[in-house]
Amino acid sequence: YHTQVVLCPGINDGEELERTIRELAERSPSVLSLAIVPVGVTKYRSDPVPLRRFTREEAEGIIESVGQWQEKLRHEIGKTFVYLGDEFYFMAGREVPKAEYYDGFPQLDNGIGLTRSFLCDWETCIFHGKSYEEPFYLDVISGTSVAPVLERLAGEEMLRQPNLKVRVLPVDNEYFGTSVNVSGLLTGEDILRTLERADGRRDGILIPESALRSGEDIFLDDMTLEFLRGHFPDIRIEPVQTGAEYRRALSDFRSYHESRSSAAYMWQSNAGYTK
C-alpha cells in the first residue's frame, strides 16, 4: 500500500518526520511508497490549532533531510521510496527532480511528480512545422506556483516561432486566499478578473483543465466555462490538461482541439489543503 504525510510546520516535521520515514521504510515492501506534501491553508480556516505554510528556508531543509533518506533507501531497497510534493521545490526555488527519481510515478494520483510528468509529456510531443505567418498573441492562465515552468516552456516555443507571443498570467487566488497558489484551485471569477485586468492584444486563451470540475465545464465557484467564454466572444478559450497538449496548443493554436480522455492532472495541486 502507498502512504502519504501532510506535513505541518512545528507539528509533524523535524524529528517526527524522521521517525515517520524510518518506521514506514522498515515496513517495505508492504509499504510501497511514502508521499510528503506540505499543508495548505485557505483564508477560511478558523480552527484554533495553529497552522501556517512552510518558509523557503524550511522547504530547503526538508529537501535536504529527505534527500538523505532518498539516497540511503535507493541504495538499500533500490528505489527512492519517499517522494516530496512539487510545492517544496517551488517554495525553495529549485528544479523538480528528474523522472528517474519518481520510479514510474506511483503516486501521480496524489499529485507527486506532476511537474516532471508534465515536462516529460512536453518533451515527447515534437512539432516541426511553423504555424504563425503573422503575430499571434496567446494568454496562458495558471496558478502562481507553476507559472515559471509554463513561462520557460513557452519561451522555447517562441524561440522556434518568433511570431508567437505568449503571455503567462499567474492568477492570485482571492477566493481561497492568495497563499493558495495552485492551478487546480482557481475559480472562474479569479480567472475572469485576471484576464480583464491584463491589457493588450490576445488572439487565444489557455486555461488549466484542473480548474474545472472533473468531467464538467464548471469552475469551483460554479461559474461555467460557457459564461467565461461569453465575456470574450471573439477569442477562443481552450482548456489544457497535459504537457503534450500544452505544446500542441502553443505550436498551432488554430488547429488545437483539447482531448478530455485523460485524467485532469494539468497543473493540479498536491498540497494538503485545510480550511
Image (tube, helix red, strand yellow):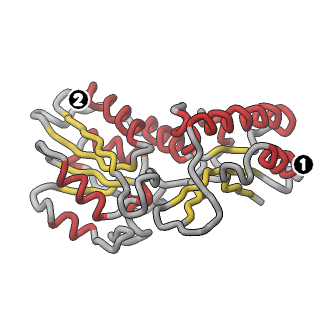
Q: Which mark is residue 167?
A: none
Residue at the spot 25% in from the left edge and 33% down from the top edge:
129
Left or right relative to 31: residue 221? left
**Which quarter shows the N terminus?**
bottom right
Residue at the spot 23% in from the left edge and 51% down from the top edge:
205
Counting other residues with Cα less than 10 Å from the Cα at mark 2, is it few (<14), some (14-19), or many (20 or more)?
Answer: some
Q: Secondary structure at mark 1?
A: helix
**Which residue reaches farthest front?**
48
Q: Position of residue 222 (x, y in %)?
A: 33, 74
- The kind of residue tagged 1 is Glu
The residue at which mark 1 appears reads as 26
- When asked about the image quadrant of residue 39, the answer is bottom right
The residue at which mark 2 appears reads as 161
In front of the other: 35 or 43: 43
- When asked about the image quadrant of residue 200, the answer is top left
Q: Position of residue 234 (x, y in %)?
A: 9, 57
In front of the other: 26 or 21: 21
In front of the other: 187 or 267: 187
Residue at the spot 55% in from the left edge and 56% down from the top edge:
40
- The kind of residue tagged 2 is Gln
Q: Nearer the viewer, mark 2 or mark 1?
A: 1
Left or right relative to 208: residue 1? right
Left or right relative to 249: residue 41? right
Left or right relative to 45: residue 228? left
Q: Position of residue 6 (x, y in %)?
A: 66, 56
